[in-house]
Amino acid sequence: MRHSTLVALLGVILLAAASPAEEDAKALLDGSSVADFERASKIYEVRVAKDPEDFAARTGAATALTQTMAVRSNGNLPLVDGLQDTPANKALWAELAPRALEHARAALAARPDSAQAAALVATAYMFHASSMGIISSILSGAAGEYKTNARRLIDRHPDHEDALGDYMMAGFLLVAPWPVSDMDQARVHFEQAAKRAPRSARNQYGYAVYWAREGDDARAREHFEKAVATPCTVNAERLFCDFIKKTSKRELTRLGSR
């Protein structure tokens, strides 16, 4: 067999061997296992190393990394009496968020109109900013970029990922310290998210936390009950669905004892 023919044949074999791994990576992202997401991130980041302009590899890597963080830190959802920024979670975000953000920003730069890339930038940046702590991140100027990312989704892709843009804007305005916080605008965006995607358990949970923090037990109870009764969608909220249900039930128990 001639050398050129042998080289060509080996190339075909290697290509065929690589394809299943790439297909497997896509399937891995549809699950909810951290181990699967970590495997997927390795596959996609190898592809990025070979071709930094590969949009699918960039979005795949960013998705795998953000989903890993979402599962391991309960989606960084707000709590009635605090935040998710434990030392362990902040260390996790500090490790993975910069990589996720790099991939997401590259994807958005390549395709500025991509809803997927815009959502990945917003989500990765949320974890990145949270790794610094809410006050430190705001002092470093994170508030402006966070709101810019959320506003991009609200303006261009309002329904994407169960109204992710409105939900993220509301969450930020809810938990940010004074004078950045804005409870009136947080309510507006939580309400808008719930209207755009009423079947999102995440949106109902966020709105319930808002009312609980405002001291309106009746409205908090209404939305916690909806969060419990509403099946989680196939979008990102599936990754922290158990947390939403358990926490909502716990808060309903608290409300019932008052």
Image (cartoon, rainbow, N blue to C red):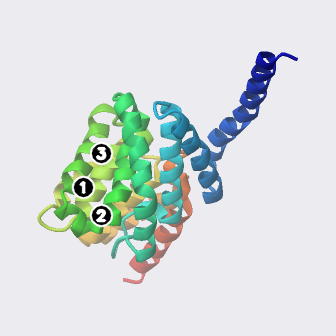
Work out which quarter of the rendered image holds the N terminus and state it.
top right
The answer to which of 195 and 56 lies nearer the viewer is: 56
Q: Residues within 10 Å of mark 3 (few under 14, many from 20)?
A: some
Image coordinates for residue 136, horizontal then vertical, percent = 23, 68
Which residue is situated farthest in the front direction here? 3
Which residue is situated farthest in the right direction here? 1
Q: Looking at the image, which residue is at 60% across and 52% down? A: 37
Q: Which residue is mark 3?
A: 192
Which residue is situated farthest in the bottom direction here? 257
What's under tag 1, amino acid-wise? Arg
Q: Are marks 3 and 2 in contact (CB under 8 Å)?
A: no
**Spatial CA span between label 1 and label 2:** 7 Å
**Spatial CA span between label 3 and label 2:** 13 Å
Going from the N terminus, do you reach mark 3 or mark 2 first?
3
Q: Which residue is mark 2?
A: 210
Disc marking residue 187: 1
What's under tag 2, amino acid-wise? Tyr
| Element carrying mark 1 | helix
Work out which quarter of the rendered image holds the C terminus and state it.
bottom left
Q: Are marks 1 and 2 in contact (CB under 8 Å)?
A: yes
Classify residue 136 as left or right of residue 37.
left
Image coordinates for residue 226, horizontal then vertical, percent = 46, 58
Disc marking residue 214: none
Classify residue 78 as left or right of residue 169.
right
The answer to which of 171 and 132 lies nearer the viewer is: 132
